[in-house]
Amino acid sequence: MINRVKAAVAQLVGGTGSSSSPWNCPECSLAFQYSRPAFLHLSAEESERAADHSTRPILVTGQDRRRQLLPWDTGYAEVINAGKSVLNEDQAAREIVSVEKRVCKNSTAGKTAKDDERDGLQFHYWALFDGHAGADAAVMAARLLHLHICEQLRDIVDVLRDGDVPPPISLTSNAGVVTEGGAKSAPHQGDWEPPTDSESRFLLEKEISHEYLVIGAIENAFRQMDQQIEREQSSHGYLGGCCALAVVYLLGKIYVANAGDSRAILIRSGETIPLSNEFTPESERQRLQYLGYLQPHLLGNEFTHLEFPRRIQHREIGRKMLFRDYSMTGWAYKTIEKDDLKFPLVYGEGKKARVMATIGVTRGLGDHNLKVYCSNIHIKPFLSCIPEVKVYDVAKYEHGVDDVIVLGTDGLWDVVSDREVADAVIRILSNCEPDNPNRFTMAAEDLVMRSRGILKEHGWRLSNDRLGSGDDISVFVIPLYGHT
Ligand code: MG
């Protein structure tokens, strides 16, 4: 399977890199060259300009004759950070992927209904990747994750396409054949025999909906992607990781898979509906603490899985102090012991919260080599590559021309609220003719401009003089009208 993904990738690797990019040095021999998303069709000069941290020009799709609009007239805009890293560590992907049992191919245009019929299933895909400690993981994931999802869906394409009820899980060969990805072919008529008494207790006649098969395929694709990044990182010396937010539209449903602190919201009839949760040291504190409790060796005798409201001094041993364990949401008192002087596994608040004083997100791809500073303590065991997948049944609702899904990296959400995003999008869309295909691009551009702000004497400032986002910012605005 990995070879098939690699072969498909061979056609995708490359792109226009900035001449100042450290990825362009020949001795690096990098398999995944840095570039901005291919769908932006940037020239070398445009790439160079886009990397200017002092002017921070906003890049968009569409809007001129040379740049094609994205399928569904999806709007996209991005801007580089204000200097926190040389490269824009965000990446984006927009694909239409055909899936069939034996052939998996990537296509972006020119498909007809007849093609779809012959190919089997087709899914639409949008994704944002927010890299940290380098752009490597984000670049790899942007070029590969949809192929891993395709590979996983191949195992169930017949079931999804023909509407068959998925076969039940069984330990007997008579009840179906397990395929590579865990899905099973239907049992042959007449082959089935009732289980004996000793077998029956092991038979699980559990019906699994198509929806959960797709969710499982996406979850497994994230795991495969993470493993591939690990292999590439060890062979090429790549560093870092990335948050991943992916949207898959398949058979009338939208699957939003999130691993990290990017966010997706639905704006429907003017209301905002969250489609993802962020995964941070604070939101996943109990999972992290439980792992530290179960496997204390992962803490390297340097950290405690307990949380305290502040660092404890040596002279406080024997006194009472508020604490929280993995099973608690509230706080209680305990008598301080010597072990409690260790640094807390989860420490800090809000954007400053960190796992082992190192990283501010708890799910994502990569980070296989990440260690606590000046130690041999690995962070990866505490990070999960598995996304939370939420499902939105598009076909269940009638959508208006201004109903959209907005995806954004944390550069957007750190400085504007869901409500502010919705109000801005509604304002832009309602000021455009409904048949203007550029209106979603204009909305995405407005969101990036709004969160970046204007460069003033005291840095990038929003319209109310609050500090603008100094992070990389990437935004998709996905229209829902007419897509069921
Ligand atoms: Mg970011």
Image: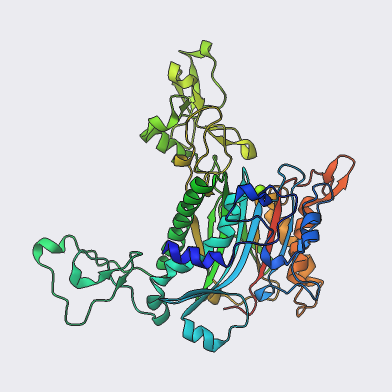
State left or right for residue 125 relative to residue 445: left
Residue displayed at 57% across by 51% down: 137
Q: How many marks?
A: 0
Q: Nearer the viewer, residue 82 or 322?
A: 82
Q: Give x and y (percent) for residue 462.
A: 82, 49
Is 162 positioned to the left or the right of 176 in the image?
A: right
> Farthest residue toward the bottom?
114
Q: Quick check: can you spot residue 376? A: yes
Residue 191 x, y percent position in the rendering: 16, 78
Extreme residue in the front direction: 27
Residue lying furthest right in this view? 457
Q: Residue furthest top?
A: 315
On the image, the x and y values in percent for residue 40 come to: 72, 66
Type of colouring: rainbow
Q: Quadrant of residue 432?
A: bottom right
Residue at image position (54%, 61%) is 144
Residue 265, position as x, y percentages in the image: 62, 60
Q: Residue 220 is drawn in which quadrant?
A: bottom left
State left or right for residue 16 relative to residue 275: right
Q: Nearer the viewer, residue 355 or 263?
A: 355
Q: Quick one: 354 or 58, which is closer to the camera?
A: 58
Q: Quadrant of the N terminus?
A: bottom left
At 49% from the left and 45% from the top, the residue drawn is: 234
Please give left or right for residue 329 compared with residue 423 in the image.
Answer: left
- Against 370, residue 417 (above or below) is below
Residue 327 in view here? no
Q: Quadrant of the C terminus?
A: bottom right
- When the figure is inspected, residue 363 is found, relative to residue 166, above or below; the finding is above
